[in-house]
Image (spheres, helix red, strand yellow):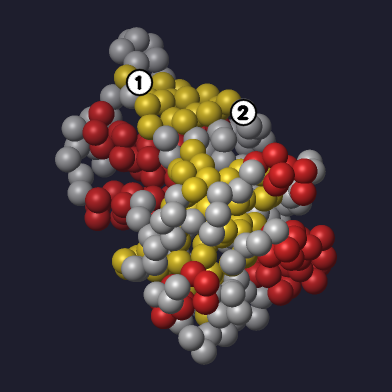
Amino acid sequence: MITFPNAKINLGLDIVERRPDGYHNLETVFFPIPLQDVLEININNEPDAEACSFTMYNASFDNDSNDNLVVKAYKALAADYALPKVNMALYKNIPTGAGLGGGSADAAFALKMLNSIAGLGLSDEKLEEYAATIGADCAFFIKNKPAFATGIGNILSQTPCNIDGYCIVLVKPEIHISTKEAYSLVVPEYPSTRLTEIAEKPVTEWKGLMKNDFERSIFAKHPSMEKIKTELYDMGAIYASMSGSGSSFFGIFKEEQNIERIKAQFPGMFCWCKVL
């Protein structure tokens, strides 16, 4: 059984307060985009097979494979239900450490596939509960629709935000921003206008209203990253932003963009574009 976990972008992101547990509450708008990994899960009927074997391609994984979020998804369900033994293979297209939610998407899609393979009949709401135990933004990928997220990114509600027909351009430099570093540099505050209100406006009005709170401190530490956002606007983007805590950036364009032009503008960086 094969599925295609997709990435997300944060159209805007406000860090609103620090929690007593050390985490931060945020408000953000998640939007799915069709940049996809490939995940295959097959039942393994060999009597001596391990419960869950995992192989990843096109990316390195420094830690034990048991720490991969796809394996954690299997273990989360296996703790409560009888799952068959499986072989899991993941081919990575979504860049890691990019603020695109690739690992969370892989885990959420694994939960949905295992639910189907094992015939568990779990509802989306129940799968979201499991997903939330794996990663903060993992629950979003269960329904995989534009959503306004609060809490640590796990409390979801629908948003009317729509950018169908626009072209999304992604650019990721070879700079790694750790989530811990990103949060340590932010001063939380509630915005004067909530993202839900801004997201309802036409895309052409987002610039200057919608923001990502991580940008100010990260740009101060990595000036080259601010230049990427500026260049996206210079190329004609009507709105551009860093996604999540970085290090990828996206630009929203009215017209379809040429990928070769983008690669020439951002040499040595991961580049991708698609009309939604």
The front one of 271 and 50 is 271
Q: Secondary structure at mark 1?
A: strand
* Rendered view: 122 above or below 227: above
Q: Residues within 10 Å of mark 2 (few under 14, many from 20)?
A: few
Residue at figure coordinates x 46%, y 44% from the top left: 34
Residue sitting at the far front:
255
* Residue 181 image point, x, y percent: 70, 63
Q: Position of residue 46 (x, y in %)?
A: 34, 10
Image spot of residue 47 (x, y percent): 33, 10
Relative to 176, say whether 5 is above or below: above
The disc label shown at residue 42, or none: 1
Q: CA distance from mark 2 to mark 1?
A: 20 Å
**Residue ID for mark 2:** 58
Q: Can you give x and y, in whole percent of width and height, for residue 254 in the image?
A: 54, 59
- Three-letter code for the amino acid on which mark 2 is drawn: Asn
Left/right placement of residue 49 relative to residue 230 reads left
Specify the quadrant of the image occupied by residue 189. Answer: bottom right
Q: Residue at x 45, y 66 (%)?
A: 29
| Quadrant in which residue 76 is drawn | top left
Q: Residue at x 65, y 81 (%)?
A: 187
Q: At label 1, which amino acid type do we have?
A: Asn
Eye-nearest disc, 2 or 1 = 2
Specify the quadrant that holds the N terminus: top left
